[in-house]
Amino acid sequence: MSLMRTKSVESSIADSAEDHRSLKRSLGTWDLTLMGIAVAVGAGIFSVGARAAGDFAGPSVILSFVLAAVTCGLAIMCYAEFASAVPVAGSAYTFTYATLGELLAWIIGWDLILEMLTAAAVIAKYWGIYLSSVFDLAGIAVPDTVSILGLQVSWGAFLIVAIFTALLVVGTKLSSRVSGVFTVLKVAVVLFVIVVGAFFIRAENYTPFLPASEPTTGGASDVWAQSLFSFATGAEPARYGVFGLLAGASLVFFAFIGFDVVATSAEEVKNPQRTLPRGIFAGLSVVTVLYVLVALVLTGMVPYTVLAEAEDPSLATAFVSVGAEWAAQVISIGILLGLTTVIMVLLLGLARVVFAMSRDGLLPRGLSRTSDVHKTPARVQIIAGVVVALIAGLTDVGVLEEMINIGTLSAFVLVSLGIPVLRRKRPDIVAAFRVPLSPFLPILSAVLCIWLMLNLTTLTWVRFLIWLAIGLAIYFLYGRRHSLLGREGLGAEGAGARSVSR
């Protein structure tokens, strides 16, 4: 049984039509565009830019966002080609299975589970906290936790996860419509904040645009907080300067996480060969413009040193500094709206990845059963909702934030490298969208993603390696022996358009 056995494109497409394990195609370009905006425009638009400007890049955080957007855009081009060639659920997992082999596909699927599980839990936790803040603004004291059997439970996290789990079980189209309403509202709030903030911009705050590099506190003794690059090269930890700009890009990349989640819905998209690329790129374009505008307003309103001195810098910090405290109330509402839709899309993506892995036999096949009425993977959707709710409601999820980035970037690397492999192995496949200048741009995408990964902390890498070790143990103890591809003795050449009997 080869660890590099691949599942043909024809087999993946054939499996998507299997009785009781197929999904209903109901999403259009507009739905996908809103889905991308919904998952990418969250609380990060109000906070991550401020943190990156104050702690790493200064006003050059604008370029950090551009670099992160370019990196994401290159990777998303690879996703778009794959999604138009292999329009089935599973996203990077399915694409890797068709090109680089089962073991790497398992690793990517396991990484995607890490990304979406931790992201959904982290954001659901913060949703509950911000819900209490909105109540406080209205003069109503509502704690964000309640004590149940001696445990402090974040009730808001349980509530929002339960609502969206129920909506996703009923139908993806209905969930998309609800998400679309929230998305339009939160974009309106972001535009309002940008327009108001523009009146407080002072040109001198953009100088120096790229602050001189300076050492950070902690030095080499703070090993776990160093980036892996600094740790490996022995470089003294520093901020600002060119490396600060690059470190800022690694941080703000978090703001662009989610477009890979859109690709997980490929099996539920009408005319996916054309619709998926259009929806993904439209969403990415809108999000990039919004983030760059927010960064311009933020760094123009106050000197970056003000953000550096703040304990928890955000866009609200800038408004308070210029005497516009009322904006903090608008921002709190915007954050709540932003987090709401992110949770829904992440829950959808998490269930679709597990669904695809289960349908291939790498996870228990019972998880891939779909509802006869709604044509949704109800079982795995409910299980995903319960797990996310328990993690968000009962644990301190703050330590998981960087795990989201490393899980996404690792998937981006393999999807990018998979494009040249797919073209070499299957030159006969005609995709509606093709990455230009291949293999140069796909390889550049992989290199940029690896660089951003190297700028994450050593502690994040240690946790990531532990997660991988757990995943590999599950694969060799269960997945490899139960893989449908392995049990049927199919390889890269023999898979073809098989007729699956189950």
Image: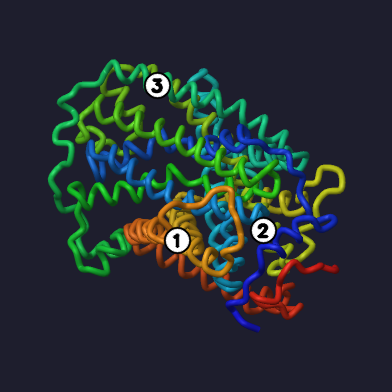
Q: Can you give x and y, in whole percent of width and height, for residue 433 in the image? A: 54, 48
Residue type highlighted by circle 2: Val
- Closest to the camera, between mark 1 and mark 2, is 1
Q: Secondary structure at mark 2?
A: helix
Residue 118 visible in the snapshot: no
Residue 227 placement (x, y as % from top left):
30, 60
Q: What residue lies at 85% left-to-right and 56% top-to-bottom?
A: 19
Residue 345: image quadrant is top right
Cβ–Cβ under 8 Å for marks 2 and 3: no
Q: Secondary structure at mark 1?
A: helix
Please give left or right for residue 205 compared with residue 176 in the image: left
Question: Badge 3 is on which residue?
Answer: 193
Which residue is situated farthest in the bottom direction here? 1
Instruction: Indicate which disc residue 97 carries.
Output: none
The Cα atoms of the two marked residues, 2 and 3, are separated by 38 Å
- The residue indicated by pointer 1 is 413
- Answer above or below: position of 173 versus 197: below
Drawn side of residue 313 relative to residue 213, left or right: right
Residue shown at 77% from the left, 45% from the top: 24
The reply to whether callout 1 and callout 2 are in contact (CB within 8 Å) is no
Q: Earlier in the sequence, mark 3 or mark 1?
A: 3
Q: Which residue is mark 2?
A: 354
Q: Residue at x 22, y 32 (%)?
A: 306
Instruction: Bin the neighbour count of mark 1 within 10 Å (Cα to Cα): few under 14, some 14-19, many 20 and up.
Output: many
